[in-house]
Image (cartoon, helix red, strand yellow):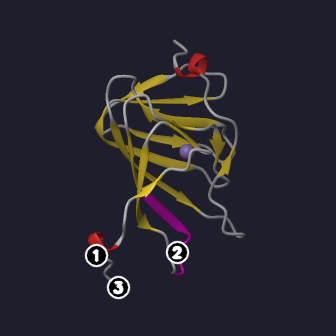
Amino acid sequence: MNITRGQTVGSKRGPADYFTGTVWVDEIAAGPNQSAVRAVSVSFEPGARTAWHTHPLGQMLHIVSGVGRVQKEGGPAIEVLPGDTIWFEPGERHWHGAAPNRAMVHLAIHQADASGNAVTWLEPVSDADYNRPA
Ligand code: MN
């Protein structure tokens, strides 16, 4: 058994190459251990979002607070609320972020592949995609 105390793990700013707006990432499960499971809590300011990206083994999001938006390639930007759980298929192009006027926090749970990769980053999300209606 190992206990990692939360106050020993500093919040990390989401890099501008991969995020639009201010985003803070708090690691929950990052190894090192035998599990390939990775988990982070991600806090988005209003309007902030990830870049387009894929996960080799898929990803589960659980909305903890605020109002969010999620989109898969070719689809509308869909509003998501606390208690919602979203699954992205392996290789599915998508993004996630906050609504324009509300912050959002989600848990993100995914697995690293055999090479240790859990995400492939692509281009930023345009305002047109961010606001794409159903
Ligand atoms: Mn994702």
On whether residue 51 falls in the magenta region, the answer is no
To which residue does mark 3 refer? 2
Q: Are marks 3 and 2 in contact (CB under 8 Å)?
A: no
Label 3's element?
loop
Q: Residue furthest bottom?
A: 1
Q: Nearer the viewer, residue 73 or 46?
A: 46
Q: Amino acid at mark 1?
A: Arg
Q: Which residue type does callout 2 highlight?
A: Ser
Quadrant position of ligand 1: top right
Numbered badge on residue 5: 1
Q: Determine the image quadrant of residue 124.
A: top right
Point 52% across, 12% down: residue: 133
Is residue 81 found left or right of 125 in the rendered image? left
- Dot 2, crowdedness within 10 Å: few (<14), some or many (≥20)? few
Q: CA distance from mark 1 to mark 3?
A: 10 Å
Residue at 66% of width from left, 45% of height from top? 54
**Residue in the picture at 35% in, 85% down:** 2
Residue position marked by numbered label 2 in the rendering: 35
Q: Is residue 82 left or right of residue 42?
A: left
Q: Residues within 10 Å of mark 3 (few under 14, many from 20)?
A: few
Task: Answer yes or no: disc 3 within 8 Å of ligand 1.
Answer: no
Which x, y percent locates residue 49? Answer: 50, 35
Q: Does label 1 or label 2 sit earlier along the sequence?
A: 1
Q: Which residues are magenta?
A: 33-40
Disc nearest the viewer among 1 and 3:
1
Kind of residue at disc 3: Asn
Image quadrant in which you'd find residue 51 = top right
Q: Nearer the viewer, mark 3 or mark 2?
A: 3
Provide the secondary structure element on which disc 1 rests: loop
